[in-house]
Amino acid sequence: MTTSRAGARAEIAIIGGTGLYSLPGLTEVERITVDTPFGATSAPIIIGTLGGRRVAFLARHGEGHTLLPTELPVRANIWALKSLGVERVLSISAVGSLRVDYQPLHAVIPDQLIDRTRGRASTFFGEGLVAHVGLADPFCPATSEVLGDAAEASDVRLHRGATLVVIEGPAFSTRAESQLFRSWGADIIGMTALPEARLAREAELCYAALCFVTDYDVWHEDEPDVDAGSVIERLRANAQAAVTAIARAIEALPATRDCACAHALGTALVTPREAVPEETRRRLAPLLAAHWGEV
């Protein structure tokens, strides 16, 4: 049964990508909907207890995988998680490899992004409120380290410190694009980390990604071209490792944060509070409360 959000709280969120549509092991489970100013979330949010922590799980592409990367309601997703008290987001996703040593069934913790998306709503701000968040390091280093350690402890072959290029989709790359991204120094390719990481930073959430390699995109002359069937098959092969890594990370994350993510809006808000329209302040209340109090 799906209920409203009244009283529901969580401190850590898991956003599951292709192949990860639920989180086994949760107890004291609530299935809730959150009304947001940006519409419905991708799916109802599942809140439960795992490793002694209250955790929210959200299926990025919807229950039954019904949403294209371009269709994802990312602002609604991040706003909803912020309103529930979430401070850290662990993202699980499928990626293609742009390097011969990043092999299918390996995992990657990226630390940089290249944005090749088009037309996606990528900020909460506007309509009378200007803010410019810093995104030099789009993934939270502290949370990424914990997630990487958890993956390695789960017997995953892991690579750290990669650059992820995010394309619009839903089609995969052309061969020319794949070779271009390799020439730029990109290591892996996906479709969903943006604007997710950017919006998480605006919401002052720590954001880290555990990416599972499913293919070599289309640049590798000796490997088959990427297709949706092989992506899902390889993700299923790594599903248990992903769940185990998530559980370990949840237990290992410290109770408090001392990273810059938690204060990203401190120097980003440009417009004076009194100049911001009341409706804009109300819409962004979960993001602004720590800086402007009651809005």
Image (spheres, helix red, strand yellow):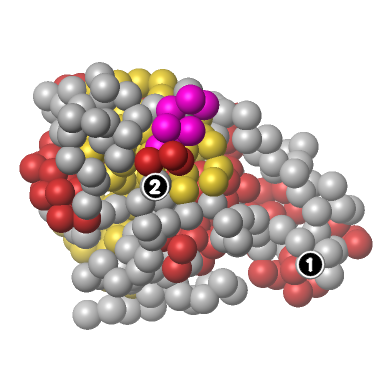
Q: Report the magenta residues as a range.
A: 178-184
Query: Could you classify mark 2 by the number of other residues whose Cα lies within 10 Å: few (under 14), some (14-19), or many (20 or more)?
Result: some
**Quadrant location, the N terminus:** bottom left
Say which quarter of the image contains residue 138: top right
* x and y percentages locating residue 262 in the rendered image: 58, 37
| Residue type pointed to by label 1 | Glu
Circle nearer the N terminus (2, 1): 1
Relative to the observer, which residue lies in front, 37 or 7? 37
Relative to the observer, which residue lies in front, 247 or 183? 183
Relative to the observer, which residue lies in front, 226 or 242? 226
- Is residue 174 placed above or below 285 in the rendered structure? above
* x and y percentages locating residue 279 in the rendered image: 76, 74
Task: Find disc 1 in the rendering and name its residue.
Answer: 127
Q: Is most of the magenta stretch helix, strand or loop?
A: helix
| Residue drawn at point x = 66 percent, y = 49 percent | 290
Does any portion of residue 152 appear in the rendered image? yes
Task: Find disc 2 in the rendering and name its residue.
Answer: 173
| Residue drawn at point x = 54 percent, y = 46 percent | 116
